[in-house]
Image: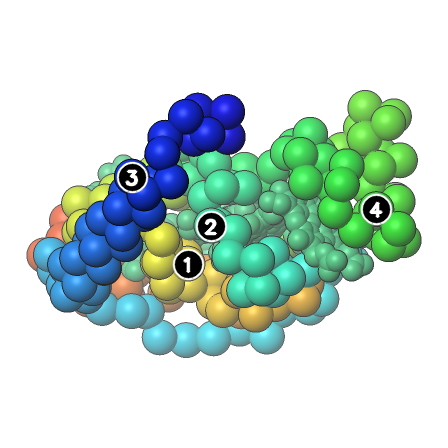
Amino acid sequence: MAVNKRIPARNRRRRVGLAWVLGLVACLLAAPMAMAAKYDVVAPGGSHDGDDVEQPIEFPHNVHVKDNDINCMYCHTYARRSTVAGIPPTSKCMGCHKMVATDKPRIKALTEYWEKKESPPWKKVSDLPDFVHFTHEKHLKTLLFDREFPVEDVKEVCALCHGDVENMTVAKKVKPLNMGWCVNCHIENKELGAPGDCWKCHK
Ligand code: HEC
Ligand code: HEC
Ligand code: HEC
Ligand code: HEC
Ligand code: HEC
């Protein structure tokens, strides 16, 4: 603000005008680029009607992702670089909820955990047996980054295995995540390097 004041008004208007034009050009360029991912991925079929998992605080994905446009990987930060996707620490929630919706009962409960320096004991929704090897990092590398799929649309990649989380009021398992389902997707996407060997998934 202080810096802006020193720019004469006429100049400032021209800068805004230029920013507008540049922004428009960027949009026009970005739109067709965003649509053309480098290669296609065959989506896995199959669905699963998982039970509702009772959580310590009902966390509404829809409010965060759909209404407020928060990226999946903003909260699940490990997905791109580790086997797990990770659940965000309470400090991340409080970055917003020290100010946002502080009068709501669920946010009061969240704040209590935070003040006690505890995390809400979130329960697992998707859970593979320990003898199965699965990694988010490799899948995201091939299904998102190497494919040059727009990162702001990553939810469509997560949706291959987790369904329409964007519209969920409570996270629910909606894909089978069993061996036949994993293997089928690997067969359909063999040319992307998806392995069929038993030992790749069972170490
Ligand atoms: C980037 C900001 C941001 C972050 C980070 C964030 N939230 Fe939110 N959250 C919001 C907004 C905005 C709303 C909608 C508030 C409203 O409707 O008034 C909301 C709503 C909620 C609600 C519903 C409140 C109600 O009863 O209406 C819950 C529960 C909640 N958040 C929990 C969490 C938890 C748990 C975390 C951390 C895992 C988190 N939030 C992280 C912005 C955020
Ligand atoms: C504001 C933070 C936040 C954002 C954004 C967010 N999540 Fe979550 N997610 C959480 C929290 C907290 C939990 C744990 C509570 C629960 O399972 O309901 C969770 C749980 C999950 C689970 C269930 C985990 C398990 O145990 O199996 C999946 C799957 C998931 N998120 C996927 C996504 C996807 C896909 C997106 C984007 C469409 C997304 N999340 C966006 C905070 C977030
Ligand atoms: C190729 C399928 C696949 C894709 C793509 C995928 N996941 Fe997962 N995800 C799984 C499986 C399988 C599990 C269960 C892992 C386990 O129990 O060992 C899981 C577990 C999770 C969990 C539970 C906690 C954890 O860290 O394990 C969260 C949260 C999650 N995924 C979020 C995401 C998000 C966000 C994306 C997109 C950025 C994503 N996943 C993309 C298959 C996938
Ligand atoms: C969307 C289709 C799809 C689904 C569903 C899927 N995978 Fe994959 N998987 C791939 C692709 C593509 C690769 C190749 C990635 C790479 O290594 O570059 C891969 C690679 C792997 C690898 C090799 C990683 C490495 O370290 O080389 C393992 C292990 C694996 N998947 C396990 C699983 C398991 C277990 C499941 C089910 C819970 C599963 N996958 C579900 C597409 C899928
Ligand atoms: C793409 C990954 C993947 C490959 C490849 C794979 N499996 Fe599995 N396997 C799984 C998953 C995931 C489970 C867990 C199923 C569940 O929880 O329902 C599993 C479970 C099993 C089980 C436990 C019994 C059961 O059905 O739950 C056995 C035994 C097994 N696999 C053997 C094999 C053999 C033998 C091969 C090679 C022919 C193989 N698997 C290849 C992913 C894979």
The quarter of the picture where the C terminus appears is top left
Read off the residue under disc 1.
Answer: 155
Gap in Å between the C-alphas at discs 1 and 4?
A: 28 Å
Q: Residues within 10 Å of mark 2 (few under 14, many from 20)?
A: some
Vertical arrangement, residue 53 with respect to residue 78, above or below: below
Query: What distance separates the C-alpha of mark 2 from that of mark 4?
Result: 22 Å
Percent across and percent down for residue 187 are 20, 63
Q: Nearer the viewer, mark 2 or mark 4?
A: 4
Picture residue at 17% right of the left edge, 57% below the top = 25
Residue located 57% across and 70% down the image: 167
Choose mark 3 or mark 1, whichever is in front. 3
Tag 3 or tag 4, which sits nearer the N-term? 3
Please state which amino acid type lies under the numbered disc 2.
Asn
Quick check: is the Cβ at mark 1 less than 8 Å away from ligand 2?
Answer: yes
Residue designated by label 3: 11
Q: In the drawing, what numbered circle is on residue 55?
A: none
